[in-house]
Amino acid sequence: MWKLRLLLLAAAAATLVAQMPKYGVGRPATADQIRDLGTAIAPDGGGLPEGSGTVAAGREVFIARCAKCHGEKAEGAVGPILVGGQGTLATAKPLKTVGSFWPYATTVWDYVNRAMPFDQPGLLKAAEVYAVVAYIFNINGIIGDDQVMDAKSLPKVKMPNRDGFVADPRPDVGNKVRR
Amino acid sequence: MQDSKRSSRRKLLRIGVAAGGAVLANRQIAKAAEDTPGQLGIPLGPYGERSPFEKAVRWRRDTKTPETGSSFTPLQDSVGTLTPSSLHYERHHAGIPTIDPAHHQLVIHGLVTRPLSLSVAEIRRLPSVTRTLVLECGGNSGSEWAAKTGPDVQRSYGLVSCSEWTGVPLSLLLSEVGVQPGASWVIAEGADACRMERSIPLAKAMDNILVAYGQNGEALRPAQGYPLRLIIPGWEGNANVKWLHSLKLTDQAYMARDETAKYTDLMPDGKARIFTYQMEAKSVITFPSGGQTLPGTGLYELTGLAWSGRGRIERVEITTDGGRSWVKANIQEPRLPIAFTRFRLPWRFDGRDAVIASRAVDESGYTQPTREALIGARGTNSNYHFNGIKYWKVQADGTVINVEA
Protein backbone atom coordinates (compact mmCIF):
# COMPACT_ATOMS: atom_id res chain seq x y z
CA MET A 1 0.00 0.00 0.00
CA TRP A 2 2.78 2.44 0.93
CA LYS A 3 4.35 1.61 -2.42
CA LEU A 4 1.18 2.67 -4.21
CA ARG A 5 1.05 5.84 -2.15
CA LEU A 6 4.63 6.62 -3.04
CA LEU A 7 3.91 6.01 -6.69
CA LEU A 8 0.93 8.33 -6.58
CA LEU A 9 3.02 10.94 -4.86
CA ALA A 10 5.72 10.60 -7.50
CA ALA A 11 3.11 10.84 -10.23
CA ALA A 12 1.65 13.98 -8.65
CA ALA A 13 5.13 15.47 -8.40
CA ALA A 14 5.84 14.60 -12.01
CA THR A 15 2.60 16.29 -13.06
CA LEU A 16 3.57 19.36 -11.08
CA VAL A 17 7.00 19.41 -12.71
CA ALA A 18 5.38 19.03 -16.10
CA GLN A 19 3.21 22.02 -15.31
CA MET A 20 6.16 24.24 -14.41
CA PRO A 21 7.64 26.38 -17.19
CA LYS A 22 10.96 24.93 -18.24
CA TYR A 23 12.46 27.96 -19.94
CA GLY A 24 10.63 30.85 -18.33
CA VAL A 25 10.78 33.14 -21.35
CA GLY A 26 8.21 35.81 -22.10
CA ARG A 27 6.00 37.57 -19.59
CA PRO A 28 2.48 37.11 -18.35
CA ALA A 29 -0.01 38.23 -20.99
CA THR A 30 -1.88 41.26 -19.73
CA ALA A 31 -5.65 41.48 -19.46
CA ASP A 32 -5.56 44.18 -22.14
CA GLN A 33 -3.66 41.95 -24.56
CA ILE A 34 -6.05 39.07 -24.02
CA ARG A 35 -9.08 41.34 -24.43
CA ASP A 36 -7.70 42.79 -27.65
CA LEU A 37 -7.11 39.31 -29.04
CA GLY A 38 -10.26 37.81 -27.62
CA THR A 39 -12.44 38.58 -30.61
CA ALA A 40 -12.75 34.97 -31.79
CA ILE A 41 -16.31 33.79 -31.30
CA ALA A 42 -17.12 30.19 -30.39
CA PRO A 43 -20.06 28.43 -32.06
CA ASP A 44 -21.87 28.40 -28.71
CA GLY A 45 -21.64 32.19 -28.63
CA GLY A 46 -18.70 32.35 -26.24
CA GLY A 47 -16.90 35.66 -26.71
CA LEU A 48 -19.85 37.60 -28.11
CA PRO A 49 -19.86 41.15 -26.72
CA GLU A 50 -22.73 43.25 -25.39
CA GLY A 51 -24.92 45.11 -27.80
CA SER A 52 -27.76 44.31 -30.15
CA GLY A 53 -28.99 45.06 -33.62
CA THR A 54 -32.24 45.00 -35.57
CA VAL A 55 -32.90 44.00 -39.16
CA ALA A 56 -33.92 47.57 -39.99
CA ALA A 57 -30.74 49.02 -38.54
CA GLY A 58 -28.79 46.35 -40.36
CA ARG A 59 -30.26 47.38 -43.69
CA GLU A 60 -28.85 50.89 -43.15
CA VAL A 61 -25.44 49.57 -42.16
CA PHE A 62 -25.46 47.31 -45.18
CA ILE A 63 -26.30 50.11 -47.62
CA ALA A 64 -23.67 52.39 -46.06
CA ARG A 65 -20.83 49.93 -45.61
CA CYS A 66 -21.37 46.73 -47.57
CA ALA A 67 -23.42 47.43 -50.69
CA LYS A 68 -20.59 48.98 -52.67
CA CYS A 69 -18.91 45.56 -52.84
CA HIS A 70 -21.74 43.11 -52.27
CA GLY A 71 -24.44 44.96 -54.23
CA GLU A 72 -27.54 46.84 -53.06
CA LYS A 73 -29.41 43.57 -52.63
CA ALA A 74 -26.42 41.47 -51.57
CA GLU A 75 -26.49 39.99 -55.05
CA GLY A 76 -22.70 40.21 -55.32
CA ALA A 77 -20.36 42.55 -57.21
CA VAL A 78 -16.70 42.94 -56.30
CA GLY A 79 -17.54 40.95 -53.19
CA PRO A 80 -19.43 37.67 -53.19
CA ILE A 81 -23.18 37.18 -53.27
CA LEU A 82 -24.60 36.86 -49.76
CA VAL A 83 -28.12 35.67 -50.42
CA GLY A 84 -29.87 32.67 -51.94
CA GLY A 85 -28.59 29.27 -52.97
CA GLN A 86 -30.63 27.19 -50.55
CA GLY A 87 -31.43 23.86 -52.15
CA THR A 88 -28.58 24.08 -54.66
CA LEU A 89 -25.78 22.31 -52.77
CA ALA A 90 -26.54 18.88 -54.23
CA THR A 91 -26.97 20.20 -57.78
CA ALA A 92 -24.48 20.62 -60.61
CA LYS A 93 -24.24 24.34 -59.85
CA PRO A 94 -24.15 24.79 -56.11
CA LEU A 95 -24.41 28.36 -54.86
CA LYS A 96 -22.61 28.62 -51.54
CA THR A 97 -23.75 31.68 -49.60
CA VAL A 98 -24.15 32.65 -45.94
CA GLY A 99 -27.75 31.49 -46.28
CA SER A 100 -27.19 28.23 -48.08
CA PHE A 101 -23.84 27.03 -46.78
CA TRP A 102 -22.49 28.64 -43.62
CA PRO A 103 -23.30 26.31 -40.71
CA TYR A 104 -23.07 28.68 -37.73
CA ALA A 105 -24.54 32.12 -37.12
CA THR A 106 -21.59 32.90 -34.87
CA THR A 107 -19.18 32.45 -37.78
CA VAL A 108 -20.95 35.21 -39.70
CA TRP A 109 -20.69 37.56 -36.74
CA ASP A 110 -17.05 36.63 -36.18
CA TYR A 111 -16.08 37.09 -39.82
CA VAL A 112 -17.91 40.39 -40.34
CA ASN A 113 -16.37 41.67 -37.13
CA ARG A 114 -12.80 40.59 -37.92
CA ALA A 115 -12.56 41.00 -41.67
CA MET A 116 -15.26 43.38 -42.95
CA PRO A 117 -15.62 45.83 -44.54
CA PHE A 118 -12.86 44.43 -46.74
CA ASP A 119 -10.96 47.72 -47.04
CA GLN A 120 -11.57 48.83 -43.44
CA PRO A 121 -11.80 45.72 -41.27
CA GLY A 122 -12.70 46.45 -37.68
CA LEU A 123 -14.63 49.59 -38.60
CA LEU A 124 -18.01 48.37 -37.39
CA LYS A 125 -19.10 48.69 -33.75
CA ALA A 126 -20.51 45.57 -32.07
CA ALA A 127 -24.08 46.85 -32.41
CA GLU A 128 -23.54 47.45 -36.13
CA VAL A 129 -22.20 43.93 -36.57
CA TYR A 130 -25.27 42.51 -34.77
CA ALA A 131 -27.48 44.63 -37.00
CA VAL A 132 -25.89 43.79 -40.32
CA VAL A 133 -25.77 40.11 -39.47
CA ALA A 134 -29.48 40.29 -38.57
CA TYR A 135 -30.14 41.89 -41.96
CA ILE A 136 -28.19 39.20 -43.85
CA PHE A 137 -30.03 36.45 -41.98
CA ASN A 138 -33.33 38.18 -42.71
CA ILE A 139 -32.81 38.49 -46.46
CA ASN A 140 -31.93 34.80 -46.49
CA GLY A 141 -35.23 33.98 -44.78
CA ILE A 142 -33.51 32.71 -41.65
CA ILE A 143 -34.96 35.21 -39.15
CA GLY A 144 -38.08 37.38 -39.18
CA ASP A 145 -38.26 41.14 -39.70
CA ASP A 146 -38.64 41.84 -35.98
CA GLN A 147 -35.99 39.54 -34.58
CA VAL A 148 -33.16 41.25 -32.71
CA MET A 149 -29.66 39.83 -32.65
CA ASP A 150 -27.59 39.94 -29.48
CA ALA A 151 -25.23 37.68 -27.55
CA LYS A 152 -28.14 35.49 -26.43
CA SER A 153 -30.23 35.27 -29.57
CA LEU A 154 -27.50 34.99 -32.19
CA PRO A 155 -26.06 31.57 -31.19
CA LYS A 156 -29.63 30.19 -31.17
CA VAL A 157 -30.15 30.99 -34.84
CA LYS A 158 -30.10 27.65 -36.63
CA MET A 159 -28.51 28.10 -40.02
CA PRO A 160 -30.16 26.09 -42.82
CA ASN A 161 -26.96 24.12 -43.47
CA ARG A 162 -26.06 23.46 -39.82
CA ASP A 163 -26.13 19.70 -40.37
CA GLY A 164 -24.46 19.90 -43.78
CA PHE A 165 -20.94 18.96 -42.73
CA VAL A 166 -19.29 15.56 -42.29
CA ALA A 167 -15.93 14.43 -40.97
CA ASP A 168 -12.97 13.73 -43.25
CA PRO A 169 -13.28 10.10 -44.44
CA ARG A 170 -10.10 10.07 -46.54
CA PRO A 171 -8.38 8.11 -47.90
CA ASP A 172 -11.42 7.64 -50.08
CA VAL A 173 -9.54 6.83 -53.30
CA GLY A 174 -6.19 5.22 -53.95
CA ASN A 175 -4.97 2.16 -52.10
CA LYS A 176 -5.72 1.70 -48.44
CA VAL A 177 -3.07 3.20 -46.21
CA ARG A 178 -1.11 1.30 -43.59
CA ARG A 179 -1.89 2.93 -40.28
CA MET B 1 31.18 44.13 -77.51
CA GLN B 2 32.09 41.73 -74.76
CA ASP B 3 31.08 38.82 -76.98
CA SER B 4 33.32 39.86 -79.81
CA LYS B 5 36.22 40.37 -77.45
CA ARG B 6 35.68 36.98 -75.92
CA SER B 7 35.51 35.29 -79.30
CA SER B 8 38.69 36.99 -80.48
CA ARG B 9 40.43 35.71 -77.37
CA ARG B 10 39.06 32.26 -77.99
CA LYS B 11 40.26 32.41 -81.57
CA LEU B 12 43.74 33.29 -80.40
CA LEU B 13 43.64 30.42 -77.96
CA ARG B 14 42.77 28.03 -80.76
CA ILE B 15 45.57 29.40 -82.89
CA GLY B 16 47.95 28.97 -80.00
CA VAL B 17 47.01 25.35 -79.41
CA ALA B 18 47.20 24.63 -83.12
CA ALA B 19 50.67 26.15 -83.21
CA GLY B 20 51.70 23.33 -80.94
CA GLY B 21 52.36 23.93 -77.30
CA ALA B 22 50.97 25.24 -74.10
CA VAL B 23 53.78 27.72 -73.68
CA LEU B 24 53.03 29.39 -76.94
CA ALA B 25 49.31 29.35 -76.17
CA ASN B 26 49.89 31.16 -72.89
CA ARG B 27 51.95 33.79 -74.63
CA GLN B 28 49.23 34.31 -77.14
CA ILE B 29 46.61 34.70 -74.41
CA ALA B 30 48.80 37.22 -72.64
CA LYS B 31 49.16 39.13 -75.87
CA ALA B 32 45.45 39.00 -76.47
CA ALA B 33 44.82 40.43 -73.04
CA GLU B 34 47.04 43.37 -73.89
CA ASP B 35 45.20 44.03 -77.12
CA THR B 36 41.68 43.77 -75.74
CA PRO B 37 41.72 44.00 -71.98
CA GLY B 38 39.07 42.06 -70.02
CA GLN B 39 36.28 43.86 -68.26
CA LEU B 40 35.66 43.71 -64.58
CA GLY B 41 32.40 42.24 -63.42
CA ILE B 42 29.94 44.13 -61.28
CA PRO B 43 31.01 44.87 -57.69
CA LEU B 44 29.99 42.74 -54.75
CA GLY B 45 26.52 43.50 -53.40
CA PRO B 46 25.04 43.18 -49.93
CA TYR B 47 22.05 41.07 -50.94
CA GLY B 48 22.04 38.64 -53.84
CA GLU B 49 20.11 38.68 -57.05
CA ARG B 50 19.73 36.04 -59.71
CA SER B 51 21.20 36.36 -63.19
CA PRO B 52 19.38 38.85 -65.40
CA PHE B 53 19.07 36.02 -67.92
CA GLU B 54 16.83 34.01 -65.59
CA LYS B 55 13.16 34.89 -66.06
CA ALA B 56 11.12 32.41 -63.99
CA VAL B 57 8.37 34.24 -62.12
CA ARG B 58 5.21 33.45 -60.25
CA TRP B 59 1.96 33.63 -62.14
CA ARG B 60 -0.90 35.53 -60.60
CA ARG B 61 -4.53 35.00 -61.42
CA ASP B 62 -6.37 38.31 -61.80
CA THR B 63 -8.65 39.15 -58.93
CA LYS B 64 -11.07 41.99 -58.39
CA THR B 65 -9.03 43.10 -55.40
CA PRO B 66 -5.22 43.02 -55.69
CA GLU B 67 -4.82 42.31 -51.97
CA THR B 68 -6.47 38.92 -52.34
CA GLY B 69 -5.57 36.04 -54.56
CA SER B 70 -2.86 33.52 -55.26
CA SER B 71 0.44 33.44 -57.07
CA PHE B 72 1.74 30.17 -58.46
CA THR B 73 5.27 28.76 -58.28
CA PRO B 74 6.89 28.13 -61.71
CA LEU B 75 7.40 24.41 -61.14
CA GLN B 76 8.39 23.96 -64.80
CA ASP B 77 11.51 26.06 -64.16
CA SER B 78 12.44 24.48 -60.84
CA VAL B 79 15.42 22.22 -60.35
CA GLY B 80 16.25 20.17 -57.28
CA THR B 81 13.87 20.01 -54.37
CA LEU B 82 13.71 23.45 -52.78
CA THR B 83 11.70 26.47 -53.82
CA PRO B 84 13.52 29.80 -53.58
CA SER B 85 11.73 32.05 -51.10
CA SER B 86 11.27 34.59 -53.89
CA LEU B 87 9.24 32.07 -55.91
CA HIS B 88 7.28 30.47 -53.07
CA TYR B 89 3.58 30.40 -53.86
CA GLU B 90 1.40 32.94 -52.09
CA ARG B 91 -2.22 33.06 -51.02
CA HIS B 92 -3.41 36.16 -49.27
CA HIS B 93 -6.85 37.18 -48.07
CA ALA B 94 -6.28 40.80 -47.10
CA GLY B 95 -2.85 41.86 -48.31
CA ILE B 96 0.62 41.46 -46.82
CA PRO B 97 1.06 43.38 -43.57
CA THR B 98 4.27 45.21 -42.75
CA ILE B 99 5.21 44.12 -39.25
CA ASP B 100 8.08 45.48 -37.19
CA PRO B 101 9.27 42.45 -35.20
CA ALA B 102 10.31 44.74 -32.34
CA HIS B 103 6.63 45.46 -31.75
CA HIS B 104 5.23 42.00 -32.48
CA GLN B 105 4.07 39.69 -29.69
CA LEU B 106 2.70 36.18 -29.74
CA VAL B 107 0.11 35.80 -27.02
CA ILE B 108 -0.89 32.32 -25.84
CA HIS B 109 -4.08 32.38 -23.81
CA GLY B 110 -7.41 30.66 -23.19
CA LEU B 111 -7.37 27.36 -21.28
CA VAL B 112 -3.82 27.72 -20.02
CA THR B 113 -2.32 28.04 -16.55
CA ARG B 114 0.00 30.95 -17.41
CA PRO B 115 -1.15 33.15 -20.31
CA LEU B 116 2.06 34.27 -21.94
CA SER B 117 3.23 37.05 -24.22
CA LEU B 118 6.41 36.38 -26.16
CA SER B 119 8.45 38.69 -28.33
CA VAL B 120 10.06 37.45 -31.52
CA ALA B 121 13.48 37.82 -29.91
CA GLU B 122 12.38 35.68 -26.97
CA ILE B 123 11.02 32.98 -29.25
CA ARG B 124 14.34 32.95 -31.07
CA ARG B 125 16.11 32.21 -27.77
CA LEU B 126 14.21 28.94 -27.31
CA PRO B 127 15.46 25.54 -28.53
CA SER B 128 14.74 25.47 -32.25
CA VAL B 129 14.41 22.89 -34.98
CA THR B 130 14.84 23.03 -38.74
CA ARG B 131 12.78 20.93 -41.15
CA THR B 132 12.43 20.80 -44.91
CA LEU B 133 8.71 20.69 -45.59
CA VAL B 134 6.37 21.07 -48.49
CA LEU B 135 3.58 23.59 -48.18
CA GLU B 136 0.56 23.18 -50.44
CA CYS B 137 -2.55 25.30 -50.69
CA GLY B 138 -5.73 23.34 -50.02
CA GLY B 139 -7.00 24.77 -53.29
CA ASN B 140 -4.00 23.70 -55.39
CA SER B 141 -5.08 22.10 -58.67
CA GLY B 142 -8.64 23.21 -57.98
CA SER B 143 -8.95 23.93 -61.68
CA GLU B 144 -8.50 20.21 -62.39
CA TRP B 145 -11.98 19.41 -61.07
CA ALA B 146 -13.45 21.35 -63.97
CA ALA B 147 -14.10 20.10 -67.49
CA LYS B 148 -11.01 21.81 -68.85
CA THR B 149 -7.89 21.07 -66.87
CA GLY B 150 -5.00 23.53 -66.51
CA PRO B 151 -2.76 24.07 -69.57
CA ASP B 152 0.58 24.13 -67.77
CA VAL B 153 2.11 22.85 -64.57
CA GLN B 154 2.46 26.28 -62.99
CA ARG B 155 -1.16 27.27 -63.32
CA SER B 156 -2.55 23.83 -62.52
CA TYR B 157 -0.19 22.51 -59.82
CA GLY B 158 1.81 25.59 -58.77
CA LEU B 159 0.23 26.38 -55.39
CA VAL B 160 2.86 24.20 -53.75
CA SER B 161 6.41 24.95 -52.67
CA CYS B 162 9.10 23.41 -50.50
CA SER B 163 11.28 25.27 -48.02
CA GLU B 164 13.55 24.70 -45.09
CA TRP B 165 11.72 26.12 -42.10
CA THR B 166 13.19 27.00 -38.71
CA GLY B 167 11.27 27.65 -35.55
CA VAL B 168 10.24 26.48 -32.13
CA PRO B 169 8.02 23.43 -31.60
CA LEU B 170 4.55 24.60 -30.65
CA SER B 171 4.50 21.79 -28.05
CA LEU B 172 7.37 23.53 -26.26
CA LEU B 173 5.45 26.81 -26.06
CA LEU B 174 2.34 24.97 -24.88
CA SER B 175 4.36 23.31 -22.11
CA GLU B 176 5.52 26.76 -21.05
CA VAL B 177 1.97 28.05 -20.65
CA GLY B 178 0.61 24.85 -19.12
CA VAL B 179 -2.37 23.53 -21.05
CA GLN B 180 -5.37 23.02 -18.79
CA PRO B 181 -7.41 19.82 -18.75
CA GLY B 182 -10.35 20.15 -21.10
CA ALA B 183 -8.44 22.04 -23.77
CA SER B 184 -8.68 20.22 -27.09
CA TRP B 185 -8.24 22.88 -29.78
CA VAL B 186 -5.91 25.76 -30.54
CA ILE B 187 -7.40 28.77 -32.28
CA ALA B 188 -4.65 30.48 -34.29
CA GLU B 189 -4.98 34.06 -35.47
CA GLY B 190 -2.82 36.15 -37.79
CA ALA B 191 -2.12 39.87 -37.66
CA ASP B 192 -3.13 40.58 -41.26
CA ALA B 193 -6.04 42.89 -41.97
CA CYS B 194 -8.60 40.05 -41.92
CA ARG B 195 -6.93 38.43 -38.91
CA MET B 196 -6.97 34.99 -40.49
CA GLU B 197 -8.36 32.47 -38.00
CA ARG B 198 -8.11 28.67 -38.00
CA SER B 199 -8.87 25.94 -35.45
CA ILE B 200 -6.23 23.26 -34.96
CA PRO B 201 -6.66 20.09 -32.90
CA LEU B 202 -4.48 20.13 -29.79
CA ALA B 203 -3.16 16.64 -30.61
CA LYS B 204 -1.59 17.95 -33.83
CA ALA B 205 -0.24 21.00 -31.99
CA MET B 206 1.49 18.69 -29.49
CA ASP B 207 2.78 16.48 -32.30
CA ASN B 208 4.89 18.38 -34.83
CA ILE B 209 3.74 21.95 -35.48
CA LEU B 210 6.37 24.69 -35.61
CA VAL B 211 6.11 28.35 -34.76
CA ALA B 212 8.50 29.34 -37.53
CA TYR B 213 10.59 32.47 -37.95
CA GLY B 214 13.06 31.22 -40.54
CA GLN B 215 12.81 30.11 -44.15
CA ASN B 216 15.67 28.91 -46.34
CA GLY B 217 18.37 30.27 -44.08
CA GLU B 218 16.96 33.72 -43.36
CA ALA B 219 13.96 35.33 -41.74
CA LEU B 220 10.55 34.58 -43.23
CA ARG B 221 9.61 36.80 -46.14
CA PRO B 222 6.77 39.25 -45.37
CA ALA B 223 4.55 37.34 -47.79
CA GLN B 224 5.28 34.15 -45.87
CA GLY B 225 4.23 35.50 -42.49
CA TYR B 226 7.10 37.62 -41.21
CA PRO B 227 7.95 37.59 -38.38
CA LEU B 228 6.11 34.43 -37.16
CA ARG B 229 3.90 31.78 -38.72
CA LEU B 230 2.64 28.29 -38.09
CA ILE B 231 4.14 25.45 -40.08
CA ILE B 232 1.92 22.38 -39.87
CA PRO B 233 3.64 19.44 -41.55
CA GLY B 234 1.45 17.89 -44.23
CA TRP B 235 -1.59 20.11 -43.71
CA GLU B 236 -3.24 22.50 -46.15
CA GLY B 237 -1.53 25.86 -46.44
CA ASN B 238 -4.39 27.95 -45.10
CA ALA B 239 -4.13 26.38 -41.63
CA ASN B 240 -0.44 27.40 -41.46
CA VAL B 241 -1.48 30.83 -40.17
CA LYS B 242 0.91 33.62 -41.17
CA TRP B 243 1.79 36.74 -39.14
CA LEU B 244 0.85 34.69 -36.08
CA HIS B 245 -0.05 36.81 -33.05
CA SER B 246 -2.54 34.78 -31.05
CA LEU B 247 -2.98 31.16 -29.98
CA LYS B 248 -6.06 30.52 -27.87
CA LEU B 249 -6.58 27.15 -26.19
CA THR B 250 -10.25 26.13 -26.23
CA ASP B 251 -12.50 23.14 -25.70
CA GLN B 252 -14.05 23.36 -29.16
CA ALA B 253 -13.28 24.23 -32.77
CA TYR B 254 -14.41 27.77 -33.53
CA MET B 255 -15.84 27.01 -36.97
CA ALA B 256 -14.07 29.99 -38.51
CA ARG B 257 -15.09 31.21 -41.95
CA ASP B 258 -12.01 29.65 -43.57
CA GLU B 259 -12.76 26.20 -42.15
CA THR B 260 -16.51 26.17 -42.86
CA ALA B 261 -17.45 28.41 -45.79
CA LYS B 262 -14.04 27.84 -47.39
CA TYR B 263 -11.60 24.90 -47.53
CA THR B 264 -14.44 22.39 -47.07
CA ASP B 265 -15.13 19.83 -49.76
CA LEU B 266 -18.69 19.76 -51.16
CA MET B 267 -19.81 16.26 -52.12
CA PRO B 268 -22.43 15.31 -54.73
CA ASP B 269 -25.02 14.68 -51.98
CA GLY B 270 -24.75 18.30 -50.84
CA LYS B 271 -22.80 17.49 -47.67
CA ALA B 272 -19.39 19.07 -47.23
CA ARG B 273 -16.37 17.45 -45.63
CA ILE B 274 -14.91 19.61 -42.89
CA PHE B 275 -11.41 19.72 -41.36
CA THR B 276 -9.87 17.99 -44.37
CA TYR B 277 -6.46 19.28 -43.34
CA GLN B 278 -4.13 16.63 -44.72
CA MET B 279 -2.71 16.91 -48.21
CA GLU B 280 -2.51 13.49 -49.84
CA ALA B 281 0.24 12.03 -52.05
CA LYS B 282 0.69 13.85 -55.33
CA SER B 283 3.18 14.16 -58.15
CA VAL B 284 3.49 15.88 -61.48
CA ILE B 285 5.92 15.83 -64.37
CA THR B 286 7.52 19.27 -64.66
CA PHE B 287 9.53 18.47 -67.82
CA PRO B 288 8.28 18.02 -70.40
CA SER B 289 5.07 19.73 -69.37
CA GLY B 290 2.30 21.83 -70.86
CA GLY B 291 3.48 24.81 -72.89
CA GLN B 292 7.01 23.51 -73.41
CA THR B 293 8.44 22.34 -76.73
CA LEU B 294 11.00 19.61 -77.30
CA PRO B 295 13.43 20.87 -79.94
CA GLY B 296 13.69 17.48 -81.63
CA THR B 297 13.71 13.75 -81.20
CA GLY B 298 16.21 11.91 -79.07
CA LEU B 299 17.12 11.56 -75.44
CA TYR B 300 15.54 13.68 -72.70
CA GLU B 301 15.33 13.43 -68.96
CA LEU B 302 11.75 13.29 -67.77
CA THR B 303 11.58 14.89 -64.35
CA GLY B 304 9.08 16.04 -61.81
CA LEU B 305 8.18 16.42 -58.17
CA ALA B 306 6.33 14.17 -55.74
CA TRP B 307 5.23 14.80 -52.16
CA SER B 308 2.80 13.56 -49.55
CA GLY B 309 1.32 15.01 -46.38
CA ARG B 310 1.47 11.51 -44.91
CA GLY B 311 5.24 11.14 -45.03
CA ARG B 312 7.94 9.94 -47.40
CA ILE B 313 7.48 9.10 -51.06
CA GLU B 314 7.94 5.36 -51.47
CA ARG B 315 8.13 5.33 -55.26
CA VAL B 316 7.07 7.20 -58.36
CA GLU B 317 5.98 5.48 -61.54
CA ILE B 318 5.94 7.01 -64.98
CA THR B 319 3.92 6.18 -68.05
CA THR B 320 4.81 7.37 -71.54
CA ASP B 321 2.00 5.45 -73.26
CA GLY B 322 -1.08 7.06 -71.73
CA GLY B 323 -1.24 4.83 -68.67
CA ARG B 324 -0.98 1.41 -70.30
CA SER B 325 2.38 0.64 -68.74
CA TRP B 326 4.27 2.17 -65.83
CA VAL B 327 7.94 2.08 -64.96
CA LYS B 328 9.68 3.12 -61.77
CA ALA B 329 11.37 6.50 -61.89
CA ASN B 330 14.74 7.19 -60.28
CA ILE B 331 14.32 9.05 -57.03
CA GLN B 332 16.72 11.67 -55.72
CA GLU B 333 17.89 10.77 -52.23
CA PRO B 334 17.56 11.61 -49.46
CA ARG B 335 13.81 11.46 -49.59
CA LEU B 336 12.52 13.53 -46.71
CA PRO B 337 9.06 13.07 -45.24
CA ILE B 338 6.47 15.65 -46.36
CA ALA B 339 8.96 17.28 -48.72
CA PHE B 340 9.46 17.68 -52.44
CA THR B 341 10.97 14.49 -53.83
CA ARG B 342 12.59 14.84 -57.25
CA PHE B 343 12.15 11.97 -59.68
CA ARG B 344 13.76 11.45 -63.05
CA LEU B 345 13.74 9.01 -65.94
CA PRO B 346 15.75 8.99 -69.17
CA TRP B 347 13.33 8.89 -72.12
CA ARG B 348 13.77 8.81 -75.85
CA PHE B 349 11.29 10.91 -77.84
CA ASP B 350 10.81 9.15 -81.15
CA GLY B 351 8.72 11.86 -82.78
CA ARG B 352 5.39 10.17 -82.22
CA ASP B 353 2.63 11.40 -79.89
CA ALA B 354 3.31 10.33 -76.32
CA VAL B 355 0.97 10.76 -73.36
CA ILE B 356 3.04 10.95 -70.20
CA ALA B 357 2.22 11.08 -66.51
CA SER B 358 3.58 10.27 -63.07
CA ARG B 359 1.96 8.68 -60.05
CA ALA B 360 3.32 8.70 -56.54
CA VAL B 361 3.02 6.08 -53.80
CA ASP B 362 3.82 7.23 -50.28
CA GLU B 363 5.20 5.28 -47.34
CA SER B 364 1.71 4.65 -45.98
CA GLY B 365 0.93 2.70 -49.14
CA TYR B 366 -1.40 5.38 -50.54
CA THR B 367 -1.32 5.63 -54.33
CA GLN B 368 -2.00 8.91 -56.11
CA PRO B 369 -5.37 8.41 -57.79
CA THR B 370 -6.54 9.27 -61.28
CA ARG B 371 -8.65 12.36 -61.84
CA GLU B 372 -11.49 10.03 -62.83
CA ALA B 373 -11.28 8.16 -59.53
CA LEU B 374 -11.33 11.42 -57.57
CA ILE B 375 -14.34 12.68 -59.48
CA GLY B 376 -15.99 9.28 -59.02
CA ALA B 377 -15.59 9.57 -55.26
CA ARG B 378 -16.21 13.30 -54.82
CA GLY B 379 -17.95 14.71 -57.87
CA THR B 380 -16.75 17.96 -59.39
CA ASN B 381 -17.88 20.53 -56.81
CA SER B 382 -15.44 19.91 -54.00
CA ASN B 383 -12.96 22.62 -55.15
CA TYR B 384 -10.18 21.62 -52.78
CA HIS B 385 -7.67 18.83 -52.15
CA PHE B 386 -7.25 17.64 -55.74
CA ASN B 387 -4.27 15.28 -56.01
CA GLY B 388 -4.98 13.45 -59.24
CA ILE B 389 -2.55 12.17 -61.85
CA LYS B 390 -1.73 14.84 -64.45
CA TYR B 391 -1.32 13.79 -68.07
CA TRP B 392 0.69 15.72 -70.66
CA LYS B 393 0.72 14.96 -74.35
CA VAL B 394 4.02 15.35 -76.17
CA GLN B 395 2.89 15.87 -79.76
CA ALA B 396 4.77 14.74 -82.85
CA ASP B 397 6.10 18.26 -83.42
CA GLY B 398 7.52 18.38 -79.89
CA THR B 399 4.93 20.72 -78.41
CA VAL B 400 3.44 19.67 -75.08
CA ILE B 401 -0.20 20.18 -74.14
CA ASN B 402 -2.50 19.18 -71.31
CA VAL B 403 -4.91 16.33 -71.88
CA GLU B 404 -7.71 15.03 -69.76
CA ALA B 405 -7.41 11.38 -68.93
Image (cartoon, coloured by chain):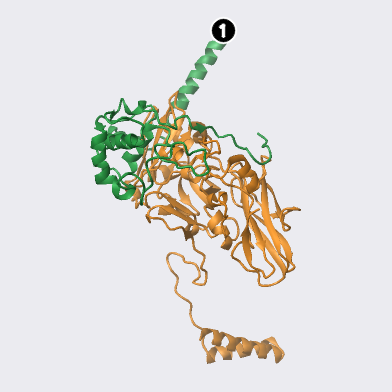
Q: Is residue B352 above or below residue A176?
A: below
The residue singled out by tag 1 in the image is A1
How far across and down, in percent of the image, does residue A152 sit? 31, 25
> B385 or B18: which is nearer to us?
B385
Q: Secondary structure at mark 1?
A: loop
- Can the viewer see residue A28 in this picture? no
* Quarter residue A41 falls in: top left
Of B350 and A28, the residue lying toward us: B350
Q: Quadrant of residue B261?
A: top left
Q: Position of residue B163 (x, y in %)?
A: 53, 52
Position of residue A51 in the picture relative to residue B88 (left or right):
left
Res. B30 visible in picture? yes
Residue positioned 26% across, 37% down in the render: A58
Is residue B87 positioned above or below A131 on the image?
A: below
Query: In the displayed structure, does residue B187 sit left or right of residue A53?
Result: right
The chain under label 1 reads A
Q: Residue at x 42, y 49 (%)?
A: B225
Closer to us: A94 or B349: A94
In the rendered image, residue B57, in percent from the top left (x then y), is placed at 49, 63
Between B2 and A58, the one lying in front of the other is: A58
Output the letter for the chain in orange: B
Q: Which chain is green?
A: A
